[in-house]
Every structure is written in structure tokens, then in C-alpha cells.
């Protein structure tokens, strides 16, 4: 799987119906009101680590095939 920056993940989440719910420091919480799913994206300047990326996508119910 290719690496993604937090900004790229936020764009993917928004495209899947998520919207920002709140911000606590560098962690942004996104919610999809239609499905009730919620996920947290750590907003740092580096690419997300593989495990963090998988966790975010799993919580959001998104399957990225590369």
C-alpha cells in the first residue's frame, strides 16, 4: 500500500461522507453521520505509519485497493 499524508486521508474521508467533528490538539475527529462511524486522524507533517493508516481506514469502513 502506498503511503499517505494526513491531508490526503482527510480528503479521502470527506469524499466518503465524513465531516470534521472536533479537534483536540493535533488529532482531528471525523464523523460520518449517515453510518455513525467515527475516526481520528493525527495531523502531522509526515506520512502516516502503515498501522495507523490501516486503523483509520478500518474505523471508517473504507477499503483502498492499490
Image (spheres, helix red, strand yellow):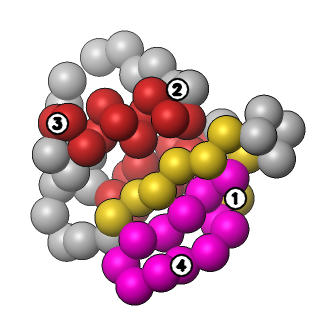
Please give left or right for residue 36 compared with residue 66 in the image. right
Which residue is under mark 4? 23
* Discs 2/4, front: 4
CB contact under 8 Å: marks 3 and 2: no
Q: Which residue is mark 3?
A: 50
Marks 3 and 2 sit apart, C-alpha to C-alpha, by: 15 Å
**Disc 1 residue crowd, few under 14, some 14–19, many 20+, Cα 10 Å:** some
Instruction: Identify residue for label 2.
Output: 62
Label whose residue precedes the other's in the sequence (2 or 4): 4
How far is the residue under mark 3 from the one under mark 4?
23 Å
Mark sitting earlier along the chain (3/1): 1
Mark 3 touches mark 1? (CB < 8 Å) = no
The Cα–Cα distance between marks 3 and 1, rounded to whole angstroms, is 23 Å
Magenta span of residues:
20-31
Cα gap from disc 2 to disc 1, whole angstroms? 15 Å
Indicate the secondary structure of the residue bearing disc 2: loop
Give the percent coordinates (x, y) of residue 24: 47, 81
- Residue at 41 percent of width and 41 percent of height: 56
Residue 17: tell me if it is visible: no
Of labels 3 and 4, earlier in sequence is: 4
- Do the residues under discs 3 and 4 have CB atoms within 8 angstroms? no
The residue under label 1 is 19
Quadrant that contains the C terminus: top left
Residue 23 at least partly seen: yes
Residue 47: horizontal and vertical position, in percent?
17, 54
Q: Is residue 36 magenta?
A: no
Where 51 sits versus 39, above or below? above
Amino acid at each position: 500500500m502506498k503511503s499517505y499524508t494526513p491531508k490526503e486521508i482527510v480528503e479521502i474521508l470527506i469524499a466518503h461522507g465524513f465531516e470534521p467533528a472536533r479537534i483536540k490538539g493535533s488529532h482531528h475527529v471525523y464523523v460520518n453521520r449517515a453510518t455513525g462511524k467515527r475516526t481520528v486522524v493525527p495531523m502531522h507533517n509526515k506520512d502516516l505509519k502503515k498501522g495507523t493508516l490501516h486503523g483509520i481506514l478500518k474505523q471508517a469502513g473504507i477499503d483502498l485497493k492499490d
